[in-house]
Amino acid sequence: MKTVTSKIKSNYGILILGILIYGSITGCEPNQAKPDHSKFEEEINYEKEKYAILQVIENESKAFWNKDFEEFSSYWAHEDYIRTLGWWEAGGVTVVEGWEERGRRTKSHMDDSPEANATATKVKRENINLRIYKDVAWMTFDQYGEDTGDPTMDMPGLSRETRILEKHNGQWKIVYVGWLLEG
């Protein structure tokens, strides 16, 4: 009788342990239904949003290399929390926090080297990984640029890129740019 009772207790303990593990994996406690998040999700037209995001990234890059500050700035959220983080051989690690600083630095670079760089816009983007949510999207990609001879604003060779965008008044705006220029 003792062995039957101890086996039942042992099996019961395993069952309780299994329920607790299942609950921790699914985020549910025993006897509680899994939460329904569908009421918080909105239908996203993925292809439409993807096209809009790719256009923002492409047009922002063109404006940057064409040294058109007004156009460039139109693709950014003008917020204190925006960030850029990058590395390239000529400049090392670069961290810029806030639109005021990002705008000031970019305008200064453009003023110091005002000639548009026509070949710099001939970049190739591959290995695109894009996630789109209601008001936020993030994207990573490999970018291949030509050596244009512009030491301040050149991105020749392979760079690993990251972008985070937010919707502001129905328009996608950049809030984070990251790059690592492998060359």
Image: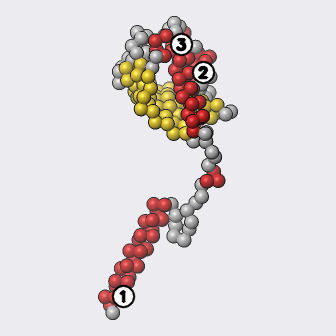
Which of the two residues, 43 or 159, is positioned nearer the viewer here?
A: 43
Which of the two residues, 144 or 25, is positioned nearer the viewer here?
A: 144
Marked residue nearer the N-terminal end (1 or 2): 1
Residue with the mark numbered 2:
73
Q: Position of residue 149 (x, y in %)?
A: 40, 9
- C-alpha distance separating marks 1 and 2: 74 Å
Quarter of the figure with the C terminus: top left
Q: What element carries label 2?
A: helix
Q: Are marks 1 and 2 in contact (CB under 8 Å)?
A: no
- C-alpha distance separating marks 3 and 1: 81 Å
Residue with the mark numbered 1:
5
* Numbered disc in front, either 3 or 2: 3
Q: Which residue lies furthest to the left in this view?
A: 3
Marked residue nearer the N-terminal end (3 or 1): 1
- C-alpha distance separating marks 3 and 2: 13 Å
Q: Position of residue 119 (x, y in %)?
A: 46, 12
Amino acid found under the numbered disc labelled 2: Ser
